[in-house]
Amino acid sequence: QVQLVESGGGLVQAGGSLRLSCAASGRTVSSLSMGWFRQAPGKERDFVSAMWRSGISTFYADSVKGRFTVSRDNAKSTVYLQMNSLKPEDTAIYYCAATSANYATGQQDYDYWGQGTQVTVSS
């Protein structure tokens, strides 16, 4: 069993930055493929970013490409999402997810989910 705990959300002005953390227990992040998703009020949960288990392959939604960066610290068993140049449309609850598979291609591939952390970007 894998437990995921997100942190780092908050209120920030447009143009600002936040770094989200997702701490994994039960398994180290180096043995997991990890994903970040977000859900804005009244909308479906959407893909944001992913890092496959190799740690080499990373992916981003077009809407965040060039602004967000996913990384991981194996020693801390934590995955990060660095969010720069934030926009009001980035406001959402952000979730991290994990699977023991080598890769994941969609939300349905993830077996474990965190509780989410709120990110609010003011204009």
Image: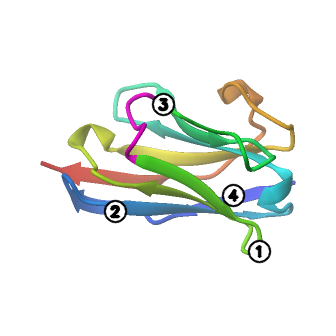
Magenta highlight range: 61-67
For the residues marked 3 and 1, what is the alpha-carbon distance in whole angstroms?
27 Å
Q: Residues within 10 Å of mark 1 (few under 14, many from 20)?
A: few
Q: Is residue 54 left or right of residue 120?
A: right
**Which mark identifies residue 61?**
3
**What element does badge 4 sit on?**
strand
For the residues marked 4 and 1, what is the alpha-carbon distance in whole angstroms?
16 Å
Kind of residue indicated by mark 3: Ala
Dot 2 and dot 1 residues touching (CB under 8 Å): no
Name the dominant secondary structure of the magenta segment: loop
Q: Nearer the viewer, mark 4 or mark 3?
A: 3
Q: Is residue 50 above or below residue 106?
A: below
**Most foreground residue, 89 or 55:** 55
Q: Which residue is mark 2?
A: 10
**What element does badge 1 sit on?**
loop
Q: Quadrant of the N terminus?
A: bottom right
**Which mark identifies residue 75?**
1
Instruction: Work out whether mark 2 precedes mark 1 in sequence or the reverse, and give the earlier one.
Output: 2
**What element does badge 3 sit on?**
loop
Instruction: Work out whether mark 2 precedes mark 4 in sequence or the reverse, and give the earlier one.
Output: 4
